[in-house]
Image: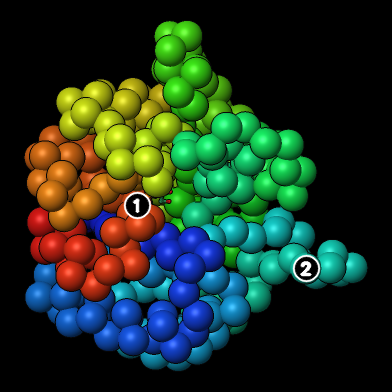
Amino acid sequence: MGRRRLVVANWKMNLTTPEGCSLVEAVLGTAKQRPEVDVVVCPSFVSLQPLGRSLAHTPVALGAQDVFWLGKGAYTGQVSPRMLVDSGCRYCIVGHSEARGRFGSEPPRPLSYFSDTDETVAQKVSALVFANIVPILCVGETALERQDGRTDEVVAEQLAKALERVAPEECSNLTIAYEPVWAIGTGNVCDADEAARMCGLIRDEVASITDSACGDQVRILYGGSVKASNCAEIFANSQVDGALVGGASLIADEFSKIVLSA
Ligand code: 13P
């Protein structure tokens, strides 16, 4: 069976719960027109419970933007996989470049609260798999790494480390998002052929880290300045299974066009 297309809205730290509830009404309308596309919205932690209630038994699935890997305990400010399940989450973004402290539109800043490392990302991926939540694992190079000709190596290393703790038989749900850091929030979308090449490279890497069945099954999204006006080109290559959308997911009409185009 072929891989289903997947379009994920990463609302980041943008919408209050009432704002999210009204946007999700429009998203639902679009998702109903395209039952062959999986649609996921990822609001902030505080909106998960109310949106989980509104989205129960609808074609739009709920995702979180991050998670902590332990089950419970004295970890002030953290949210466990079990809490995500309890809120109705079926997906969770993990290892986003912003959570790793790698920003596309700003010079590097020593912000130690954006502190994900390959090791914490691996812990989070494994905890999500254990909780039966689909990890949307983000990988991608910075502008400097690309300039230095290190793109493929950086992405391969991020993948190998993030998947260190998962067994091949646990990978059936795995989703990867190729998000070049320099394309995020900058308007500099990656060239469609290059995005497809990177998605192909990621598929080959996943197959070699796990097994070929997993390489065939894994869904690979492109993310970084995806808009209604550029998504058709990105979706045209069969290596790209969908998109992880930031800014454009906050505008009902833009996001609808992306879903309809997928
Ligand atoms: P933009 O679509 O705003 O570039 O953000 C992409 C992203 O980071 C999605 O996770």
Residue labelled with disc 2: 77
Distance from mark 1 CB to nearest ligand 1 atom below 8 Å:
yes
Q: Nearer the viewer, residue 192 or 19?
A: 19
Residue 226 vertical position relative to residue 202 in the rendered view, above or below: below
Element class at badge 1: strand
Q: Which residue is found at the position 34% from the left and 86% from the top?
A: 22
Using residue 20 as the reference point, say whether residue 199 is left or right of it.
left
Distance from mark 2 CB to nearest ligand 1 atom below 8 Å:
no
Q: Nearer the viewer, residue 144 or 69?
A: 144
Q: Nearer the viewer, residue 24 or 172?
A: 24
Q: Position of residue 80 (x, y in %)?
A: 69, 67
Q: Quadrant of residue 37?
A: bottom left
Residue labelled with disc 1: 244
Q: Which residue is found at the position 12% from the left and 70% from the top?
A: 34
Using residue 85 as the reference point, say whether residue 227 is left or right of it.
left
Q: CA distance from mark 1 to mark 2?
A: 26 Å
Q: Quadrant of residue 62?
A: bottom left
Element class at badge 2: loop
Residue 2 vertical position relative to residue 182 in the rendered view, above or below: below
